Amino acid sequence: MLCFLATEGIGEYAMQAADFKPTKLSLDSLTDTGVRVQVEGDFTMDASKVKKKSVRNFGRFGTWIAREAETGPAEVDVYLPEYDMVRAGTAKIPGIKVNIRNGHTTHVSFFAHVEPGQFSSLRNVANDWMDGRLSQIRLKGKADVPLQSGLIRLGSQTIEESFTFQGDSLPSVPRYNITRLNLREQRPGHKGMGADVSIVVNNDFPLQLTVPPVAVDVLVDGCLESDKHIMVGTAETASLHIQPKTDVEVNVTGRVDTLPEALTATCPGSSKSPLDSLLGNYMHGQDAQIYVSCCNFPDPETPAWAHDLLKDITVPVPLPSHEMGKLIRNFSFANVHFSLPDPFAEPGTPEAAPKISAVVKVDINIPNEMNFPLDVNRVKADADIFYHGKLLGTLALKKWQKANSTRIDAHGGDGPSLLVESDIRNAPINIKDDDVFSEVVQALIFGNKGLTMKVKASVSVRVDTPMGGFAVREIPAEGVVPVKPIGSGNGEHGGLPHNISSLAPQVGNLSIIETTRTSMTIQAIVNVTNPTNYSATVPYFNINILVNKTIVGQAVAKDLHIHPGNNTNLVVQTLWDPYTHSGEKGKEVGRQLLSQYISGYNVSITLQAHNATLPSQPALGAILSKYPLTVGAPHLSGPKNPTDDPDKPDDGKTHFIRGATMHILSSTALFTLASPFSSTIMYITSLNATAFYEGHPSGKILYELPFAVPPGLSETPRLPVDWSFGSVGYEAIRKALGGTLRLSAFAEVGIRIGSWREEVWYKGGSIGAQVRL
């Protein structure tokens, strides 16, 4: 309105006193070259805004005389000085009449035709504004305006004026809020995904217009900031009717047909793809960013200039981070299988770490907005395992593991979830704190209650969706894993030591595979019951055998596979060498143990780990050594006598002498022996034995010639007997002629197996002896 008063005399007054407040700006229609807009506002002359008194008084006087001013039709060109004075646009304004007296207000309403200027320059301004590089903008207007006051024509006046917008006067990008999001299949049973989004945009402008339907491309960042953006889909809006200073609800429909390879391909020098970075920021609580590239207009009546003006304008749109809440609803292991490390692996390598195999079950919450088929077919993870708040170790699943998933619909107060199951195999566990590991081992083996371990993991999954398959990497996850104790405690006497009898070990098929002067290596077939729900693979295990805290040998197991329940035909080797391990004391302790064992005494041995129990895990061996285990010596299952009653229960004792026949006239005795060995021949090198009847000596055998005891049942040579004539024992034998009686015996026996030799004693009771003439 300044142009109305721009005569030479009162120009300065007009510049300072004129005030125009727009009340409405509406888009009337689109034309082939621009837009037709309606402008409404209030024009007022306010003399108090004029700084100089002389100018103020002169201006009030002149405008009081003139009363009104009127312009003729004019064209106003607007330029951008900071952008090489390019023309921003031209407005064609009709003639306007206003009251110019001080304090008078004129309501103005007119239609103007606005044509945009150079499109590329306008796009540069728009991009600078949206990228935050525009701290201020200066506009310069220029027009030749015909003026008249009343009947007096004042000629054409050239008006030039600059306006600077900065700070609060510079319009900002409108705030918005996403009020609804629905991700769905584009069409059931077809490839592609659709999205329905409702956005409320704050409108603080006195602007009224109708925006035609708009289609945009949706893009994301590439690997580097300098890379070209990657197009992932399109979005469309219906026609929008915008009212002045009224928030606008925008309904957007999006579509993704397929994922481009550039989006899912791993970036050079990185393990992540652009999609990983986008989703990673979103799920880690950081704002992610997409880009909207303008614009296409589906309505054919939209003028071509609108597309030419807005094309190549790319608007960054931050996606507010989504509060994932408790993403993992439940985390558990099933069918757990532990594998001990390769015994000869280099310490510190993955091969030297214990391994775990299990079915991992993860129940994942699904946001209500995700309403499309979702399948997880691969999973891998890096997990930190904590016990009582201290780091126990790490579990590294570096390779993709097969997985399957099942969607569980919402029920009760729980939303929908995805149950993912993965059968992991031989995942290495890297122990970080031996003290913490010791606590866990103690709780698992000797405890009667389960324990819980906290897991913090970074999980990667391969996902199949209607728009294709892709990997989502490094999803943060936390969970609590309950672990049952290895001991099958009943709540009162839980833990392995109190239930060793439930192992029910049975040892048979003994054979000697190597001997020296002081040692022999015994191989046996062992049957054992695993009372736990855990299975284990043992590639190598070496444990000391002790008697009264004296080491007498070592047991060695290789390539054992233990599963819950009955385990049969396990091959175990025992190196019996008391002298090498413990010297003369050990030799005597070993002799006493063997003597008591073959005599049927209830003897016990102690099994204790040591640093070399697992050569690649000396720390684990040291931990296990703190928990020695004392057990009864296993019962050897010897050969059956054909005359034995098959229904007679085993008394749990080892019987080497199965029977005897006494010949009175020849003064000899013949014994039936049961060798526990399946393929080894044992030799008795000397025998000094006395038979007793109810404590009274019956006869004595002194034999210095060696004889063989082959595997199975066998008979000794006829051994000479020196009868105790006149004794109660001998009379009992004589009276039993033709029948049987029960005798006891005590003997000093020399034994040789290969190169190994030993002197043992034998005390047997209730030997069934037949008496013959």
Image (tube, rainbow, N blue to C red):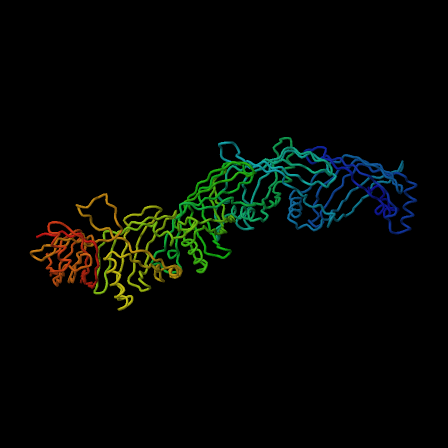
Number of disc labels? 0
Query: In this rendering, would 396 be left or right of 215?
Result: left
Query: Which residue is at a point 49% across and 33% down the rendered structure image?
Result: 190
On the image, which quarter does residue 159 sit in?
Answer: top right
Percent coordinates x, y for residue 589 in the rendering:
27, 64
> Residue most toward the bottom?
584
Query: In this rendering, would 190 be left or right of 239?
Result: left
Quarter that holds the N terminus: top right
Percent coordinates x, y for residue 14 in the rendering:
85, 45
200 up-or-down from 167: above or below: above
Query: In this rendering, would 194 be left or right of 719?
Result: right
> 271 or 671, which is in the foreground?
671
Percent coordinates x, y for residue 753 in the rendering:
19, 60
329 up-or-down from 391: above or below: above
Asked if residue 756 shows in the view, the reply is yes
Percent coordinates x, y for residue 741 in the rendering:
16, 52
On the image, which quarter does residue 70 sit in?
Answer: top right
> 760 or 97, which is in the foreground?
760
Query: In this rendering, would 658 be left or right of 479?
Result: left
426 up-or-down from 36: above or below: below
Asked if residue 305 shows in the view, the reply is no
> 377 or 151, which is in the foreground?
377
